[in-house]
Amino acid sequence: MKEDSLAYKVYLEVRKKILSSQLAGGARLVENFWAEKLSVSRVAVREAFMRLAGESLVEFGGKGGCFVKSMTIDDVKEIRELREILEIGALKILFAKKNKEVLKELQLICDDFSAMVEKGYYGGACEADVKFHEKMIESTENARLILMYKNSNIPLFHMRLGAVMDQMEDYQDTDKEHRAIVEGLANDDWELSYSSLVRHLYRGEQEALELV
């Protein structure tokens, strides 16, 4: 595999961990660790870190260390506002499409989330949470919307999912809200899907603000 492909492999893996809050703001990223973990060279890891820095997901310290960028109060509020605009827009498109295959895929992600929580695999649950929202966006098949969402590097708002293992109420609320969104889509109940999504985003914002 070429060096640039290896760097992309590292980029995707670290980006996924950051967006799913498995790597919290302020966490140091050690080149040797990621090189060994992903069986790549330190050069590939360094290139991946540079790309992540270009997307404002990580930053370099004064002594050259690389750290996950922490979110400010303004960051949290702006991200919630952006997510609301993009995801409600995506929801409108999904209601218009009425694609049963999309419903099945979203339901499977909900089931995957529940299974991960039940097994105590909280990292997997975090990734399933991110995947649910990304699937909503991707299923619109609107290339510009998908690109905007991807380039915005939307992080998981329920940071307690990744940071605190005993926040079962948050896991349960997330599961209920995701399933309510799907239920609304399945039954052509806009109000159910819309209110569940907005509640999900606002709850996430409040919990994220508690940790900033």
Image (cartoon, grey):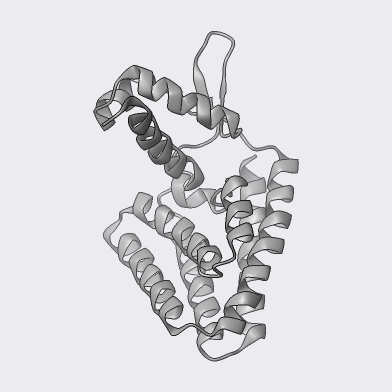
Q: Is residue 196 visible to us here?
A: no
Where in the figure is residue 53, as x and y percent of width and height? 56, 28
Q: Residue at x 37, y 49 (%)?
A: 123
Q: Residue at x 37, y 18 (%)?
A: 43
Q: Residue at x 38, y 28 (%)?
A: 4
Task: Give the image quarter of residue 69.
Answer: top right
Q: Is residue 31 visible to us here?
A: yes
Q: Nearer the viewer, residue 82 or 80?
A: 82
Q: Nearer the viewer, residue 141 or 31?
A: 141
Q: Give the side of residue 7 with respect to residue 185, left or right.
A: left
Q: Give the side of residue 178 with respect to residue 119, left or right.
A: right
Image position of 76 with respect to 55: above or below? below
Q: Give the side of residue 88 with respect to residue 50, left or right.
A: right
Q: Residue furthest bottom?
A: 187
Image position of 178 with respect to 185: above or below? above
Q: In which quadrant of the rendered image does the N terminus lie?
A: top left
Where in the figure is residue 150, as x and y percent of width and height? 56, 50
Q: How many marks?
A: 0
Where in the figure is residue 151, as x and y percent of width and height? 60, 46
Task: Give the image quarter of residue 22.
Answer: top left
Task: Give the image quarter of residue 103.
Answer: bottom left
Image position of 111 with respect to 159: above or below? below
Q: In which quadrant of the rendered image does the C terminus lie?
A: top right
Q: Residue at x 40, y 76 (%)?
A: 107
